């Protein structure tokens, strides 16, 4: 889902990704400060996603009004606790969990297996893919982050493997992720890739490990 309009808040985040290329430390988590109100194009894309997720029309309208006022949905807030959780097994292995929050917004978190070639043969590890109303995030496991930090060949293999479950992650620069992974390892955290659900730019993140 692509839009042609970029708000100042979104431009700032993309700029932060570029800053990471120059060696600064970028640590990004789910947004918990109010963002610029969503655009009409973004509203259309978000409404479609909510319809696909079977969120009731009345809840959709309330969430759209909340986003248009510049407030974050509960699914974007790290301090919010879900009121319901549904977990299912994925056909290719791994699990998917849909958390529903008090305002009706949802966060889908999947533990997805990816396979890369190691020195002793194929190695399968799990990556966390998380999406809510605003962001989609791929967060590497601790082992994947260490492997990615080892160099561009290993990093390229992991990014290529991610292209199956998260095609948009292919847009990230390999060198940028090697640098991010090295900084993540030094902080005892994990590297990842994030994008807005309604726009194409992607940027690297560093967050506490989940796998």
Image: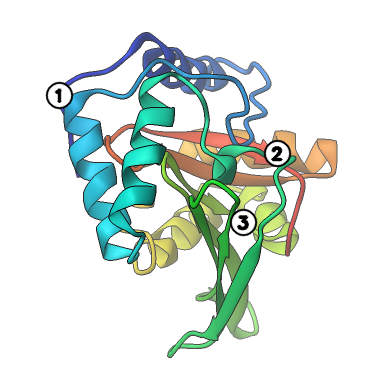
Q: Quadrant location of residue 55?
A: bottom left
Q: Earlier in the sequence, mark 3 or mark 1?
A: 1
| Nearest the eye: 187 or 108 | 108
Residue drawn at 55 percent across, 15 percent down: 22
Residue 209: where, in percent of width, then height?
75, 53
Looking at the image, tell me whether mark 3 or mark 2 is earlier in sequence order. Answer: 3
Q: Nearer the viewer, residue 47 or 22?
A: 47
Outermost residue to the top: 8
Are there few (<14), some (14-19), or many (20+) residues within 10 Å of tag 3?
Answer: many
Identified at 50% across, 61% down, the residue is 158
Please give the residue where the numbered disc 1 appears in the rendered image.
Answer: 4
> How many angstroms separate mark 3 from mark 1 (CA)?
29 Å
Observer able to see residue 173? no
Cα–Cα span, label 2 and label 1: 33 Å
Question: 121 or 195: which is nearer to us?
Answer: 195
Camera-near label (3 vs 2) is 3
Q: Residue at x 34, y 59 (%)?
A: 56
Q: Secondary structure at mark 3?
A: loop
Give the percent coordinates (x, y) of residue 207. Answer: 70, 41
Which residue is labeled 2 in the image?
182
User: Which residue position is annotated with label 3?
Assistant: 140
Q: For the residues marked 3 and 2, what is the alpha-carbon distance in whole angstroms?
A: 13 Å
Residue 172 is situated, as x and y percent measured from the top left of the image, at 39, 40
């Amino acid at each position: 889902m692509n839009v042609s309009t970029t708000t100042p808040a979104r431009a700032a985040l993309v700029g932060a990704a570029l800053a990471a290329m120059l060696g600064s430390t970028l640590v990004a988590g789910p947004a918990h400060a109010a963002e610029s109100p969503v655009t009409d194009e973004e509203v259309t894309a978000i409404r479609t996603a909510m319809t696909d997720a079977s969120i009731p029309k009345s809840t959709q309208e309330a969430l759209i009004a909340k986003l248009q006022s510049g407030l974050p949905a509960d699914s974007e807030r790290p301090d919010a606790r879900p009121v319901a959780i549904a977990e299912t097994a994925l056909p290719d292995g791994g699990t998917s969990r849909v958390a529903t929050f008090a305002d009706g917004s949802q966060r889908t978190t999947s533990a997805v297996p990816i396979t890369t070639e190691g020195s002793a043969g194929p190695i399968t590890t799990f990556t966390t893919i998380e999406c809510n109303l605003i962001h989609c995030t791929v967060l590497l496991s601790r082992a994947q982050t260490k492997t990615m930090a080892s160099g561009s060949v290993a990093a390229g293999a992991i990014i290529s493997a991610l292209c199956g479950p998260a095609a948009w992650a292919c847009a990230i620069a390999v060198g940028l992720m090697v640098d991010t992974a090295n900084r993540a390892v030094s902080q005892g955290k994990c590297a990842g890739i994030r994008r807005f659900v309604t726009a194409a730019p992607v940027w690297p993140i560093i967050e506490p490990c989940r796998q």
